[in-house]
Image: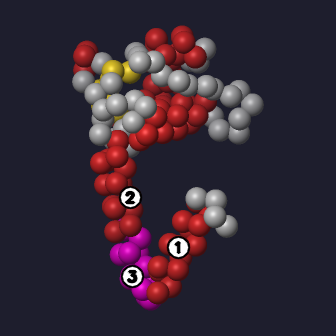
Amino acid sequence: MTLNITIDPGSADAPYEQLRAQIAGQARSGALPVGHRLPTVRGLAGELGLAANTVAKAYRALEGDGVIETRGRNGTFVAAAGDAAERHVAAAASRFAAEARRLGVGEAAARSAVEDALRVAYGRD
């Protein structure tokens, strides 16, 4: 199984962000199964024609998001991304709820703000 990554040099998104988003999306969709070994930083950089630092930055961001995990000299592997993503979203929701309460925003207004944000984020606006 190989990565299906395309970097668009004309994109408004930086190459490391394009790489991060594509690997995260493939991990979430199951196209990259949990436990799949990813190429080395240098190997992927060479394949994609990117600087090694660009790939390393994307890998660090993915590791921070819980999408991948590095096992020392054994390599970098796809982690259980769905679980990590759900944990991050739950933590963000908890922080939002606490902030809304601290600011004195009512529950209905807080729900409305979240629904509006989701409509915009998912392109339903």
Q: Crowding near pointer 3: few (<14 within 10 Å), some, many (20+)?
A: few
First in residue order: circle 1 vs circle 3: 3
Q: Nearer the viewer, mark 1 or mark 3?
A: 1
Q: For the residues marked 2 and 3, what is the alpha-carbon distance in whole angstroms?
A: 20 Å
Residue drawn 25% across the image and 20% down it: 72
Q: Which mark is residue 102?
A: 3
Which is more toward the observer, 71 or 32?
Answer: 32
Residue drawn 39% across the image and 62% down it: 92
Looking at the rendered structure, the kind of residue marked 1 is: Glu
Q: For the residues marked 1 and 3, what is the alpha-carbon distance in whole angstroms?
A: 20 Å
Q: Which residue is mark 1?
A: 115
9 sits to left or right of 120:
right
Q: Which residues are magenta?
A: 95-107
x%, y% of residue 41?
44, 18
Looking at the rendered structure, the kind of residue marked 2 is: Val
- Depicted 112 relative to depicted 117: above or below: below
Q: Can residue 15 be seen in the rendering of this structure?
A: yes
